[in-house]
Image (spheres, rainbow, N blue to C red):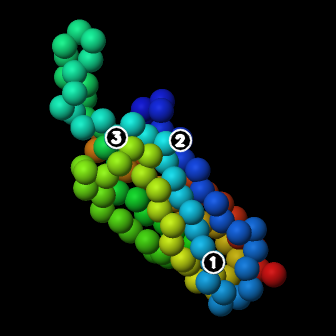
Amino acid sequence: MADDAKPRVKVPKSAKAGETVTIKALISHKMESGQRKDADGSLIPRSIINRFTCELNGANVVDVAIDPAVSTNPYFEFDAKVDAAGEFKFTWYDDDGSVYEDTKPIELS
């Protein structure tokens, strides 16, 4: 797992049943293309986030396939309907095999 990848997400602490909330998710990641060389002239291995998912209580909220042309530190903002209290689970998949996760709870108000 790359040491540089750091997920950050922003989820409201609570919502009313049936309310739609805005979720913000960013991962600090270099998104190395595999085409650059290091100081010794060796190719730097490719390491690109190729998929991002979000679930609420195990149900899919968003599932995004990411192309290699995406910028460094990919950011997503999307809406999710909250029908019950629970936990959002965020997962980023790196094509080097690494998986990065974060979770955030949400309560009903």
Q: Which residue is mark 2?
A: 6
Q: Quadrant of residue 1?
A: top left
Mark 3, residue position: 31
- The three-letter code of the residue at mark 3 reads Met
Mark 1 is surrounded, within 10 Å at the Cα level, by few (under 14), some (14 to 19) or many (20 or more) other residues, namely some
Q: Give, as a three-letter code, the residue at label 1.
A: Val
* Residue depicted at 27% across the width and 12% down the height: 39
Indicate whether 75 appears above or below 13. above
Q: Is residue 108 visible?
A: yes
Residue 21: which disc? 1
Q: Residue at x 71, y 69 (%)?
A: 12
Mark number, residue 13: none
Q: CA distance from mark 1 to mark 3?
A: 29 Å
- Residue 61: x, y in percent? 48, 75
Question: What SS does tag 1 mark?
Answer: strand
Figure quadrant of residue 95: top left
> Relative to residue 74, is residue 83 depicted above or below?
below
Residue depicted at 23% across the width and 9% down the height: 40
SS label for mark 3 = loop
Q: Is residue 13 above or below residue 95?
A: below
Q: Nearer the N terminus, badge 1 or badge 2?
A: 2
